[in-house]
Image (cartoon, rainbow, N blue to C red):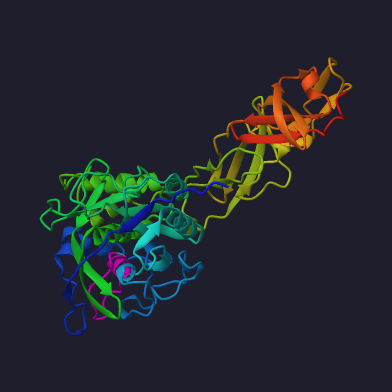
Amino acid sequence: MRRIALATVVVAGFVVVGAAAAIVPSDPNASHPAYAALNMPAAWDVTTGSPDVIIGIVDSGVDATHPDLAGAVLPGFDFVENKPAATPSDGHGTGVAGAAAARANNGIGGAGTCFRCSILPLRVIGADGIAFNTTTARAIDYAVDHGAAVVNASIYGPNVSEALRRSIQRARAAGVLVVAAAGNEANDTPQYPAAFPETISVGASTYAGARASFSSFGPWVGFAAPECAPISVLGGSSGVGCMTSVSSPLVAGIIGLMRTQAPFASADQIVAALTRTALARPVPGTRTGVVDAAAALHAIGSPEPRLQPVLFGDAVVGSELEALTGIWAGAKLDTTYRWERCRAGDCAAIAGATHARYMPSSADQGSRLRAIVSAAGVGTAASPQTPAVASAPKVLARPSITGRPRIGGRLVANRGRWRGSSLRFVVNWQRCRGGCVQIATGPTYRPTARDRGARLRVEVVAHNALGAVTALSKRTGVVR
C-alpha cells in the first residue's frame, strides 16, 4: 500500500486587542463598529437567527461552558483524537464561535452576527496548530450530515486537496455553504479552502471599507468583512479579535440569518443575494466587497422549495452514490427517493433502492443511474443520469493452459473468466524452476530446449481505468 503525503493547513490566527467592560444590563461591546459596517442592527430587526440553524465551527474546539455561548453549543466531535468533542486545544475556535453566535443582551462582551443560532464544534486543529486537509474534509462531511446550515473554516494553507474540495462540493450540493478565511498573508497567493470556487471566501476590510493591510487578496477572494470584532475568549472572558479568522465567522453568522429567513433557498440563491448587495460596497482585492447583512436578507426573501437533485460519487460497482436535493436538511422536507436503471433511454425502478444512498452492483454495469426525488407539497424531480456504470476488473475463474508441455508443441493460454468494464488483457508466459521468470507474451507459446525440465504457467493481467488485477494459472507438467 502506498502512503499518500497529506497537505496541511494552518490557523488563520487572530490577536486579542481589547477586554470586556464591567458587566452591565446590555452587552458592553454592542456598539463596536464592526456591527455598523455589516449593517447588523437593521438585519437584527428582521431576524436574530434560530437555535434550529446550526453553524459548524471547524477549528480547535469550542468552550461550551463559556458564559457568552451558554446554551449555544451542541455536542460535536474531535477529529484529531477521534472522540466526542471535549476541551478545546486552544482559544481560537472559541473566539471564532463567539464572532458568529455569542449570545446577546446578557451583559457580556458583544453579540455574534447570528446570536440565536447554534454552534456545532468540530475540532480539526491539533496541539501543534496544524489541521490536515483530509481531517478538515471529514469534519465538513460530518457537519452536513448533522444538520449544519453553514460551516466556518478559519484555517488556511497553500496546498490543494481534492478530498477537501469534494467535501465542500458535497456540502454545496446539500444546500450547505462553507465559509473560509482568506488568510493573513498580505499577498495574492491562493489559500485553501478559501480559494476553491465552491467556497465563500472572506478577506478582511477596515471599517471604512478599504482592504485591511494584512489580508490576503486576489480574484479568488469573494467577500470582505471587518478586520476586528468582539469575540469570546477562552476562560470565560471576552474581548475583540482581529484577522480573517474573525472576518470569516461574521459572514457565516450572516448566512445563518439568511438561512433562518429562507430555509428552502438554494446555496446559489444565497450566494447571489450576498453578491448583489456586496457589489454596492466594493473592496479592492475582492470580487465584490463588504457584506451588507440587512440588504442580503432583503435580497434573499423567502423562496419556495425547489428540488434540484444531483448525484454525488462515482458510478462504479461497489462505490456508493448519494442523492443530494440541494435543500438544507434543517428545512426538514419529507423527502422520498427512488433509484432507476436506464438503458437506451428507458429507465426502470431498481427494486428496494428507496434511500438517499445506493451502491451499484454488477447488475448495473453498463447502465446509467438516476435518482427520482419527491417531497410532500413540493413535487418530484429527477437527477441527471450518471455515466455508464463501470466495474473494476475481477477474476471469476483463473486462467488455464491447454496443450502438452513438449518442446516444439503448441500451448494455448485461456484467460479465464473476468468481470469488469472495457477490460484489456496482457498474457505473460513464465518458466518455473523454483522461482518463475517471464519468457514470452501472447496467447500461445511453443516450448524450446531452454524449457526442458521446467514447468510453465501464464500470468493474465486484466486492466481498465479503475485498476489492474493479476491472475495466475496452475503450472504445467514438466516440459519434455
Position of residue 108 in the picture relative to residue 31 (left or right) = right
- Front-most of 59 and 211? 59
Tell me the quarter of the image containing the C terminus.
top right
Left/right placement of residue 278 relative to residue 64 reads left
Q: Which residues are magenta?
A: 95-113
Rendered view: 319 above or below 475 = below
Left or right: 470, with 95 as reference point: right
- Left-right relation of 232 to 118: left
x%, y% of residue 367? 66, 31
Tell whether position 468 is magenta.
no
For the point 24% across and 40% down, which residue is it? 219
Q: Which secondary structure class fits the magenta region best?
A: loop
Q: Residue at x 34, y 54 (%)?
A: 179
Q: Is residue 252 above or below residue 107?
A: above
- The percent coordinates of residue 198 (x first, y second) are 37, 44
Q: Residue at x 34, y 64 (%)?
A: 129
Residue drawn 49% across and 59% down? 142
Q: Is residue 195 visible?
A: yes
